[in-house]
Amino acid sequence: MFWLQRTLLGRRGYTTVSGKGGERRITRLGPWRWVMLGYALFVCALAVAVGAAAERWLAFDDLSLVFMTAVIVVAARSRMGVAVLAAVLCFLAYNYFFLEPRYTLYLSARHGWATVLMFLGGALLCGRLANRLRSQVILLGAARAQAEALQALGRRLTVAGTDAEAIAATTAALADALEAEPIVLLWDAAHARLG
């Protein structure tokens, strides 16, 4: 199960998690948003190709699950806005290429409207759930890293015998956790200043 999760979600993300546990700060993608939009378009085009192949060679009648899978793949690897775009693109592609009358966005039958509207609702819901799962995995990774840093600090403080060793252990743990050089200021009571 863990392997499947890693395969679907990958190790890269586009959300920067910082601050207190459970708090998120989203970093803007800037020009990379076009890459993500291209990714959504590519996955939807791939879903059309897979749907056409499944319809032709496997005689599948209902291809909505192919497009639903495409939306979930995009949602698991991108932001919610990109997932919504993928859901709408897949909705339109499913309607245009696979529902009668073909190669139009017109739906002649009542059940056709019900099918595409249910597909759109399901795709949006699945996209939201996949995106929420991705966000929770990112937050859990940050919480795990914080817990490991605190555990390492606890181990170092346990073996410290003096204040100087405790300060050295704390600065080493901060340096490891923050990947930066910490500066420690101590109060010098004799001279009433920081030293």
Image (cartoon, rainbow, N blue to C red):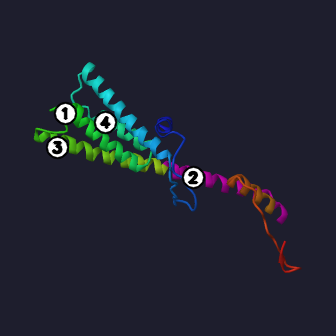
Q: Which residues are magenta?
A: 137-165
Q: Main secondary structure of the magenta part?
A: helix
Residue type, mark 3 in image: Ala
Residue type, mark 1 in image: Leu
Q: State which tag comes first along the sequence, 4 or 3.
A: 4
Q: Position of residue 9 (x, y in %)?
A: 48, 40
Depth order, front residue of 7/150: 7
Residue at coordinates 31% horizontally, 41% vertically from top-left? 89
Residue at coordinates 32% horizontally, 27% vertically from top-left? 49
Marks 2 and 4, how far apart at CA: 32 Å
Give the side of residue 143 with respect to residue 155, left or right.
Answer: left
Location of residue 172 (image quadrant): bottom right
Residue type, mark 4 in image: Phe
Q: Position of residue 176 (x, y in %)?
A: 72, 52
Asked if the residue at tag 1 contacts the one at tag 2, i.e. Cβ–Cβ closer than 8 Å, the answer is no
Look at mark 2 in the image and give the residue it sits on: 142
